[in-house]
């Protein structure tokens, strides 16, 4: 087989990352520069600061990645880049670098949807098995996707309001935890008891999710306790919130697996790092004879390795961009 090396570029939010992947699944080198510490000072990602930081670091990240891989641009076959969705100012930096490199080195340019990247994080070091259901859970997305084959995405349900990671981060703020609070709520939940009577979010017959109600319920409890001069029991609230969220995600995912008659489940996105979700899905899959794949934690959060992996399959199915590729803040996965 003729080996193909894909250079992936990711800059959709607060990670500047470049990676080289061989044949869609073998990681050669990845560099991820996270801006998380800077944004933590503001309690969330500040788009203007994020795009400026991408500008400052992206060429250094590229140099470092090539150095780590002991490769030159001449050995790269394709350039894959996240063109959306994400913060527009941030996406523009990655897209500009990708189009410039594509022009200078005369390499084809492959547009990659950020969620396709998260899904293909499950293809690093192994290969996806079809048909499959992908549960995508991140700071910006909560979706159930049916895939019959490589690079074919059928969205069967999604959040009607907040994404699950967003709800985690908002609840963390109510609990006075620093940004990004998702991992901290996860950790805290193991120290508490499920004592708060929170609702099971959108427990209906659809594949859709809704997390704004449970988030408001947490805010209301905190508000009521404050009025009574009491503090919220953070550990118990974290435990109650996590249990409810994990329960509904597991329940609707199982429903999709059964109704679509699928034996493979993959999980994608930053919230795939959640230990409660990982263990609940593991138990559910063992009980129902489902093969479960969850990426290593380092591939769950934003990185360019997953973009390069997805790029390989995107070009195989004919996706190609011109030099005028536009970054798009909102774009559907197709
Ligand atoms: O996929 P990602 O890196 O960025 C987006 O594309 O959104 O996901 C980041 C999100 C944040 O909301 C963060 O709080 C959440 O993933 N997250 C977690 C955990 N680790 C990251 N949420 C709950 N439990 C975790 N362990
Ligand atoms: Zn992401």
Image (tube, rainbow, N blue to C red):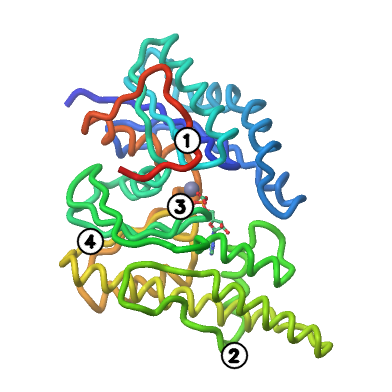
As helix, strand or loop, the secondary structure at mark 3 comes to: helix
Q: Position of residue 7 (x, y in %)?
A: 40, 27
- Asked if the residue at label 3 sits under 8 Å from ligand 1, the reply is yes
* Mark 2 vs 1, N-terminal side: 2
Q: Is residue 329 left or right of residue 257?
A: right
- The disc at residue 264 is 4
Tag 1 near tag 3, CB within 8 Å = no
| Residue at 63% in and 81% down | 237
Residue shown at the point (58%, 63%) measured from the top left: 183
Seen at 33% across and 25% down, the residue is 5
Instruction: Give the number of the disc on residue 195.
Output: 2
Judged left or right of residue 97, residue 7 is left
Looking at the rendered structure, the number of numbered marks drawn on it comes to: 4
In the rendered structure, which disc, 2 or 3, sits on the residue that comes first in sequence? 2
Q: Which residue is mark 3?
A: 300
Q: Position of residue 271 (x, y in %)?
A: 48, 60
């Amino acid at each position: 087989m003729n080996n193909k090396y894909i250079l992936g570029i990711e800059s959709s939010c607060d990670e500047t990352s470049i990676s080289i992947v061989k044949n869609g699944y073998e990681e050669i080198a990845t560099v991820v520069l996270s801006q998380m510490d800077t944004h933590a000072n503001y309690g969330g990602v500040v788009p203007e600061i994020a795009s400026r930081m991408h500008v400052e670091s992206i060429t250094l990240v590229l140099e470092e990645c090539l150095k780590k891989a002991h490769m030159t641009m001449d050995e790269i076959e394709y350039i894959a880049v996240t063109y959306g969705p994400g913060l527009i100012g941030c996406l523009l930096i990655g897209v500009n670098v990708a189009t410039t490199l594509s022009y200078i080195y005369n390499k084809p340019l492959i547009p990659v949807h950020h969620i396709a990247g998260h899904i293909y994080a499950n293809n690093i070091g192994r290969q996806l098995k079809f048909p499959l259901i992908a549960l995508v859970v991140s700071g910006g997305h909560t979706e159930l996707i049916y895939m019959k084959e490589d690079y074919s995405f059928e969205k069967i349900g999604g959040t009607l309001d907040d994404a699950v990671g967003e709800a985690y981060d908002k609840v963390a703020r109510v609990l006075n935890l620093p940004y990004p609070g998702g991992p901290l709520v996860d950790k805290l939940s193991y120290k508490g008891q499920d004592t708060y009577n929170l609702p099971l979010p959108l427990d209906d017959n659809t594949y859709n999710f809704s997390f704004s109600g449970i988030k408001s319920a947490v805010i209301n409890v905190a508000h009521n306790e404050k009025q009574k001069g009491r503090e919220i029991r953070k550990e118990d609230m974290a435990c109650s919130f996590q249990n409810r969220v994990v329960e509904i995600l597991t329940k609707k995912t199982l429903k999709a697996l059964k109704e679509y008659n699928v034996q493979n489940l993959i999980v994608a996105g930053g919230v795939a790092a959640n230990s409660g979700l990982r263990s609940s899905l593991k138990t559910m899959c063992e009980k129902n004879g489902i093969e479960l794949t969850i990426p290593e934690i380092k591939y769950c959060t934003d990185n360019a390795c997953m973009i390069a992996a997805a790029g390989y399959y995107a070009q195989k199915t004919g996706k190609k961009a011109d030099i005028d590729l536009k970054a798009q803040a909102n774009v559907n996965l197709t």
